[in-house]
Image (cartoon, rainbow, N blue to C red):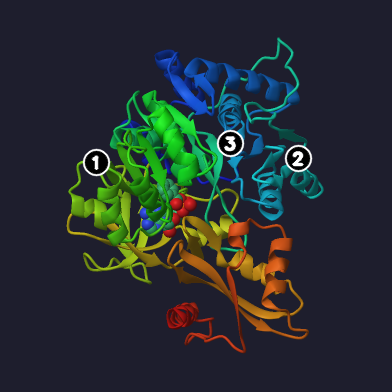
């Protein structure tokens, strides 16, 4: 099957990646069958008191694949999957892999605007969600998006408990299609984004499985590994770095948690003897404080990963000592490139760097504003190309021309430097995005929403420092008449149906914006302005 909307690797690169054994020509379904044959009776998934062996998992995925096929889902179809951390998420995902249909991995926090956009942009034929989760009614959301998503034929909900998707029983003679080729797109991941509309990331079976296998190896996973999935399971970090898929690669166990607070997570760690947990930086001080009070709760932990946002070295030093487990930093992106500190790296490397790439064939360039390499050790823009980094977003030709160099390097938008030892250190960001404790807010998307308000003349969203989340969002607004109050604008943005984490944390009214010499809004000056105000108030 060919996709007009993807940018494949050039033939010479693809051939080299195969020849070097990175791309094995194996689809997710074939890889999974191997795991099931090898680890059949081991426990793959734990959700509360429910335990699925690899064999049960495979049977559930197969049953779901037949039911989805009976519904008319065929290879190449896109299906928006928005589920909390539950076994149904894995049954549906692996059912779609088996069919060769493409999950579009939404996050539970996404709302009408995001989900509606994914359905339209991907031309999705189905949307799968839990009826209710975390006090939110996804049935109402489904009704709203249906009106504007002409391709959407099916809305499917999980049964109570989220252990399966409520589907009609398939006719016993429903035959499954032969399954996709390894070079085809397996799913669409979401980009954190910096533009007005989110971008979809096409990942192939070949490229993703390479990153999964290597991640599992780098993180030392074995069939003894017990991984706590406390961050959203569909996010690239929790899915593949090494995440649930890395655990399945090794034949270990994934323990599904409905949240990452110590109250929820610690009892599970204790009960299931969890060995690996993945955190974002804001959770670290909270976990350290709770660990101090509940000695022994984390005794089984061997590896604590921290990634997704800037991790303060002083906090990293506390984490290296405070968990009684090995610390690992993870600097990755859904577009591909993932860096890890290694388990045998010296302590200073683990504390003060974000590690080095998975693959010897991950190409790294650190450049100035004119794409010229910076001096060794200097800070510059990170560009990358390699065996699991995409060459283009899904159906986004104009954006791709900006987001990739002519020779196929992805412009990550991150500002980094390379240490003498070969590790990357993230120093900042050039992309117009706020990283709110690991959750990414594209500034332009929210500015666009603010500008839709009749009382807003202009708007600029910037990051403001926050002791807990690292960054929160502050919207600078020039008002017209009638002048809205800050609370009106917050309500207005929320009312347009965006994820709560994207709603501005603070609104500042000004008469004019500082401008750069070329006449653009000077966001650096705005960030400095709000940082100074917060410091003065503290
Ligand atoms: C992960 O993936 P995304 O796609 O949500 O976000 C990627 C961006 C990076 O470009 C960078 O700006 C930021 O998130 N980031 C970090 C970081 N890890 C990610 N910034 C500073 N320090 C870090 N350690 O966030 C993601 C994907 C796979 C594994 C881990 C994280």
Q: Which residue is mark 1?
A: 343
Kindly identify which residue carries mark 3: 2
Q: Say what secondary structure mark 1 lies in.
A: loop
Q: In this rendered view, identify the residue nearer to me: 169 or 534.
A: 534
246 over 196 or under it: above or below? above
Q: Which residue is mark 2?
A: 152
Image location of residue 536, percent across then percent down: 44, 83
Quadrant of the rendered image containing residue 451: bottom right
Tell me the distance, in whole angstroms, between the alpha carbons under discs 3 and 1: 40 Å
At 31% from the left and 37% from the top, the residue drawn is 219
Sooner in the amino-acid sequence: mark 2 or mark 1: 2
Q: Is residue 52 left or right of residue 112?
A: left
Residue at position x 73%, y 21% from top?
A: 70
Q: Compare marks 2 and 3 and give the one earlier in the sequence.
A: 3
- Judge left or right: residue 491 versus residue 50: right
Q: Nearer the viewer, mark 2 or mark 1?
A: 1
**Of residues 249 and 210, which is closer to you in this image?**
249
Q: Nearer the viewer, mark 2 or mark 3?
A: 2
- Quarter of the rendering occupied by the C terminus: bottom left
């Amino acid at each position: 099957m060919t996709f007009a909307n993807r940018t494949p690797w050039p033939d010479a690169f693809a051939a080299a990646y195969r020849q070097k054994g990175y791309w094995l020509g194996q689809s997710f379904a074939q890889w999974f069958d191997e795991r099931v044959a090898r680890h059949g009776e081991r426990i793959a998934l734990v959700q509360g008191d429910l335990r699925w062996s690899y064999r049960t998992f495979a049977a559930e995925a197969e049953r779901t694949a037949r039911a989805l096929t009976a519904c008319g889902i065929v290879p190449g179809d896109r299906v928006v999957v928005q589920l909390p951390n539950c076994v149904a998420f894995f049954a549906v995902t692996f059912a779609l892999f088996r069919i060769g249909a493409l999950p579009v991995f939404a996050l539970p926090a996404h709302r009408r605007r995001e989900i509606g956009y994914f359905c339209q942009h991907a031309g999705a034929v189905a949307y799968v969600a839990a009826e209710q989760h975390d006090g939110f009614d996804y049935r109402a959301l489904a009704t709203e998006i249906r009106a504007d998503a002409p391709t959407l034929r099916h809305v499917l909900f999980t049964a109570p408990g989220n252990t399966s998707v409520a589907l009609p029983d398939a006719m016993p003679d429903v035959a499954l299609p032969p399954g996709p080729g390894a070079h085809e797109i397996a799913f669409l991941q979401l980009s954190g984004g910096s533009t007005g509309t989110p971008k979809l990331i096409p990942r192939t079976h070949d490229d993703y499985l390479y990153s999964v296998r290597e991640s599992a190896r780098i993180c030392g996973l074995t069939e003894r590994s017990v991984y706590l999935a406390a961050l959203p399971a569909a996010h690239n970090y929790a899915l593949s770095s090494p995440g649930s898929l890395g655990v399945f690669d090794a034949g270990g166990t994934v323990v599904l948690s409905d949240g990452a607070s110590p109250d929820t997570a610690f009892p599970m760690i204790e009960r299931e003897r969890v060995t690996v947990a993945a955190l974002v930086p804001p959770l670290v001080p909270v976990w350290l404080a709770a660990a101090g009070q509940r000695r022994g709760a984390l005794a089984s932990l061997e590896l604590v990963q921290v990634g997704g946002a800037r991790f303060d070295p002083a906090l990293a030093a506390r984490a290296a000592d405070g968990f009684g487990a090995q610390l690992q930093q993870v600097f990755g992106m859904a577009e591909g490139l993932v860096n890890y500190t290694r388990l045998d790296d010296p302590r200073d490397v683990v504390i003060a760097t974000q590690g080095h790439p998975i693959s010897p064939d991950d190409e790294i360039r650190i450049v100035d504003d004119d794409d010229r390499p910076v001096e060794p050790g200097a800070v510059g823009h990170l560009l990358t190309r390699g065996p699991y980094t995409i060459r283009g977003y899904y159906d986004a030709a104009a954006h791709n021309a900006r987001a990739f160099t002519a020779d196929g390097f992805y412009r990550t938008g991150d500002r980094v430097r390379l240490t003498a030892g070969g590790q990357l250190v993230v120093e900042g960001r050039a992309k117009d995005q706020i990283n709110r404790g690991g959750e990414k807010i594209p500034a332009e998307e929210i500015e666009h929403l603010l500008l839709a308000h009749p009382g807003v003349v202009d708007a600029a969203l910037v990051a403001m420092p926050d002791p807990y989340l690292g960054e929160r969002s502050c919207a600078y607004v020039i008002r017209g008449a009638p002048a809205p109050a800050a609370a009106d604008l917050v309500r207005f943005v929320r009312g347009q149906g965006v994820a709560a984490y994207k709603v501005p944390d603070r609104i500042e009214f000004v008469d004019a914006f500082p401008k750069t010499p070329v006449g653009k809004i000077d966001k650096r000056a705005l960030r400095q302005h709000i940082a100074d105000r917060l410091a003065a108030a503290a």
